[in-house]
Image (cartoon, rainbow, N blue to C red):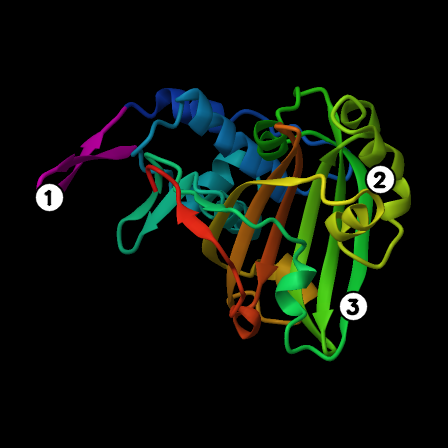
Amino acid sequence: MVARLRKPGATLYFAVPITDAAEYLAQPLLTSPGQPLRVAVYSRISRGIRTGILPGGAMLPRETELCVSLGVSRTVVREALMLLEEDGLIVTRRGVGRFVAESLPTEGLDDFRSFESMFEPGSERLDVRVLEFSRQTTTDFVTDLLGLEPTDEFWFRESVIIRDGRPAALVQEYLPVERLLRPISEPVARELADAAREDATLLRALIGRVGPVFTAGVCRIAASLAGPTRAAHLDIKPGDPLLVLTQSAQIGGAPAYISKAAIPPAFAHLSVTQWTLASGA
């Protein structure tokens, strides 16, 4: 494994021990029923990053090496790596390789809105097609942003926003289960199941039922590639670029909601107001 050392006017690379990292990555993957392999690979690598087994600035193994270590296909590894880069955990340097990020660049948005509102201006018709609403066991991504315990559960909802007959965004939403939501907001916990039945994003449905109780947390904006799974939902090619917005929200200062929207280039002109660059970005 190689890591890089910054010096004024230059970037140097240095070797770090790979034994711990290699042994960690070679451990059998643990998946929950129905959990995609790409999520399990994402969790394995992200946990290694957060625990320091894969330190900041360290170079990740090549895709083929990860396939062998983790026992999965190259497609699964590529999709997991795309998600890790979208979430700011790794960075790619063309011609060199992928590296563990030394910091997490974030951008704060003062105005918290449902994703439908971004596509409504200029559209004649806006529809939301729900793909999935299921109860799942926490992953590293959800545990960190919602402040849940590894044994907690959350609700996952996936939908496609369709603007004038064309897929405009694939939206994934995450909320704690009702038992964990009640101490934060009894109305949201009470209305969650019925809101999930509406042909709208879960955020818009909840706001319509209980009012604007959510306040903006952090929004991270990243460029990525579609990959096979998202490409199929958005009617684009797996190698097509995407704009990915990962946003969190709170209720009364407590983490309560996460959304991730993948937007193809045709719909990348969005109206975002009152934004500021977070420190360290």
Residue identifier under label 3: 127
User: What is the magenta range?
Assistant: 1-16
- Do we see residue 255 in this rendering? yes
Q: 141 and 221: which one is in front? A: 221
Precedes in sequence: disc 1 or disc 3: 1
In whole angstroms, how far apart are the C-alphas of marks 1 and 2? 52 Å
What's the magenta bit mostly, secondary-structure-wise? Answer: strand
Q: In which quarter of the image is residue 88?
A: top left
Secondary structure found at label 1: strand
Residue identifier under label 2: 192
Disc 2 packing (10 Å; few <14; some 14–19; many ≥20): many
8 in the magenta segment: yes
Residue shown at 69% from the left, 31% from the top: 31
Residue identifier under label 1: 10
Disc 3 marks a residue whose amino acid type is: Asp
Q: Position of residue 184 (x, y in %)?
A: 74, 25
Residue shown at 10% from the left, 44% from the top: 10
29 in the magenta segment: no
Residue shown at 34% from the left, 42% from the top: 281
Q: Is residue 134 left or right of residue 63?
A: right
Disc 1 marks a residue whose amino acid type is: Ala
Secondary structure found at label 2: helix
In whole angstroms, how far apart are the C-alphas of marks 1 and 3? 50 Å
Precedes in sequence: disc 3 or disc 2: 3
Disc 2 marks a residue whose amino acid type is: Leu
Q: Where is residue 35 in the image (x, y as percent from the top left)?
A: 71, 39
Q: In this view, does 66 lie to the left or right of 227?
A: left
